[in-house]
Amino acid sequence: MEAAAYFVVSEALANVTKHAKASRASVTVRRSGDRLTIQVQDDGVGGATAVEGSGLAGQRDRVGALDGELHLLSPEGGPTVLMVEIPCAS
């Protein structure tokens, strides 16, 4: 689970750097009970999608393989918010 969380954050920040034209990004990680929640938000241009074949779709599939969920909010004009929930042992 720790490795999955690390890769979620590193891939999300790489996407911010490559695509978002953002001046700021934030990462929030919280554990509540048996769920780990990761949120990466930027102030970039928005418009990110998790279409098949994209890096975000691959990330969604990897999170899903861990019985987790990936949620993406990225309207045109921004901001983009990526939230991932992953089950974790207590």
Image: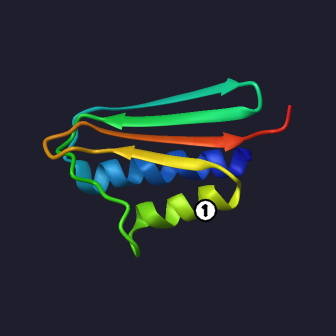
User: Is 57 placed above or below 53 here?
Assistant: above
The 10 Å Cα crowd at callout 1, few under 14, some 14 to 19, many 20 or more, is some
Q: Position of residue 25 (x, y in %)?
A: 34, 34
Viewport quadrant of the C terminus:
top right
At 58% from the left and 53% from the top, the residue drawn is 7
Spot the residue most to the left. 77
The tally of labels here is 1
Identified at 31% across, 58% down, the residue is 49
Q: What's the amino acid at mark 1?
A: Arg
Circle 1 residue: 62
Which residue sits at x=69%, y=24%? 32
Expressed as whole percent of the image width and height from the top left, the position of residue 22 reads 22, 40
What residue appears at the point 15 percent right and 46 percent down from the top-left corner? 76
Measuring from the top left, give residue 24's x and y in whole percent: 28, 32
Residue 32 appears left or right of 13:
right
- Asked which secondary structure carries label 1, the reply is helix
Q: Is residue 87 left or right of residue 18?
A: right
